Image (cartoon, rainbow, N blue to C red):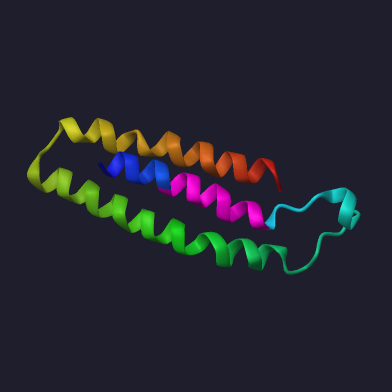
Amino acid sequence: MLLVLNTLGAVIYVFRASLSWAIPQEHGLISPTGEPFVWAAAVFPILAAFLLLNLIWGIVILVRKQWFNVRLWLLTTPIWMVAIGIDFYHH
């Protein structure tokens, strides 16, 4: 369930981050100065929420010794890396 939630969060992250993707041909070499702030305001709450969720999930796995769930928890890393990679590719 939490893996699906992380996947959904990564999709929402990419959608929200796309609001600040600028087309260089429209702005020349100098991008609008507010672009980083738009990006941060759009994605920071998502990243913070899922960081907290995944930290709590990891702590629960350690405390309850649910070693099978470690695999699912670790699968969140490539999901978020792909989402962040897509975002950074467009900047």
The percent position of residue 11, horizontal first and vertical second, equals 49, 45
Q: Position of residue 64 (x, y in %)?
A: 8, 44
In percent of the image, x 65 and y 57: which residue is there?
A: 19
Residue 52 appears left or right of 45: left
In the image, taking residue 78 as reference, residue 58 lies left or right, namely: left
Q: Residue at x 52, y 41 (%)?
A: 83
Tell me if residue 87 comes above or below residue 38 in the rendering.
above
Q: Tell me which corner region of the image, top left, top right, bottom left or bottom right, holds residue 86.
A: top right
Q: Which residues are magenta?
A: 9-19
At which x and y percent is residue 85?
A: 58, 39
Quarter placement of the N terminus: top left
- 11 in the magenta segment: yes
In this rendering, the count of numbered labels is 0
Say which residue appears at 24% left-offset and 54% top-offset. 56
Question: On the image, which quarter does residue 66 sit in?
Answer: top left
Q: Is 16 in front, or is 24? A: 16
